């Protein structure tokens, strides 16, 4: 019950989010990315009729590595918890909680990460999956590395 209250608190303290602009860099990485497609499938399963049973299954397993954009950071830099967007780079859909102290670069909104952790709890409205992650399982990405080989769904293809 504490976890759900914690997730609700994070949702209430989040500043209003603007929808991603068509030329927003975050949108470049989403189309055709198998990790994002996997995330969407996980979210659909969690929100479906058998969502509770599915949550019980994935709670004991490590989720596949997911791309994430940090939207907000809570708890300071030593032991941060942060709200991220996996699906579109602007809509909050997961809360990442570190299982140890963070020694990497200062985490701040807009940073791109690859996150590899375990699902712990779920709130359906609004959708938030709490993911516990060991600090060593987070890779901070540079923008140039994030969009290699992907096609942007936001920009039309030039012919």
Image: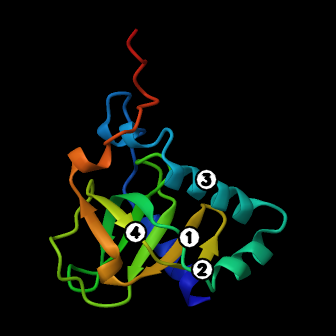
Residue at x 63% of width, y 71% of height: 123
Q: Nearer the viewer, mark 4 or mark 2?
A: 4
Residue to which mark 2 is pinned: 121
Q: Which residue is mark 1?
A: 129
Q: Earlier in the sequence, mark 3 or mark 2?
A: 3
Mark 4 to mark 2 CA distance (whole Å): 16 Å
Secondary element at tag 1: strand
Q: CA distance from mark 1 to mark 3?
A: 12 Å
Mark identifier at residue 40:
3
Label 4 sits on a secondary structure element that is strand
Furthest residue to the top? Answer: 159
Give yes or no for contact between labels 3 and 2 (Cβ–Cβ under 8 Å).
Answer: no
Nearest the viewer among 145 and 45 is 145
Question: Gap between marks 2 and 1, in whole Å?
Answer: 6 Å
Say which mark, if any, is on residue 115: 4
Question: Is 127 placed left or right of 137 in the picture?
Answer: right
**Label 3 Cα neighbours within 10 Å, binned few <14 / some 14-19 / many ≥20:** some
Front-most of 102 and 19?
Answer: 102
Residue 5 located left or right of residue 77: right
Residue 39: where, in percent of width, then height?
57, 58
Q: Give the quarter of the image for residue 111.
A: bottom left
Label 2: few (<14), some (14–19) or many (≥20) C-alpha neighbours in 10 Å: some
Q: Earlier in the sequence, mark 2 or mark 1?
A: 2
Q: In the figure, is residue 127 to the left or right of 88?
A: right
Point out the tag, 4 or 2, that comes first from the N-terminus: 4
């Amino acid at each position: 019950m504490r976890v759900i209250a914690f997730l609700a608190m994070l949702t209430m303290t989040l500043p209003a989010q603007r929808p991603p602009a068509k030329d927003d860099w975050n949108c470049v990485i989403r189309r055709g990315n198998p990790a994002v497609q996997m995330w969407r499938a996980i979210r659909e399963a969690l929100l479906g009729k058998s969502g509770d049973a599915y949550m019980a299954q994935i709670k004991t397993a490590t989720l596949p590595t997911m791309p994430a954009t940090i939207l907000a950071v809570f708890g300071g830099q030593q032991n941060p918890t942060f709200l991220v967007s996996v699906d579109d780079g602007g809509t909050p859909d997961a809360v990442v909680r570190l299982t140890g102290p963070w020694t990497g670069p200062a985490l701040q909104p807009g940073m791109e990460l690859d996150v590899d952790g375990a699902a712990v709890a779920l709130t359906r409205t609004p959708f938030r999956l709490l993911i516990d992650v060991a600090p060593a399982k987070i890779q901070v990405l540079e923008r140039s590395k994030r969009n290699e080989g992907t096609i942007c769904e936001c920009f039309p293809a030039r012919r």
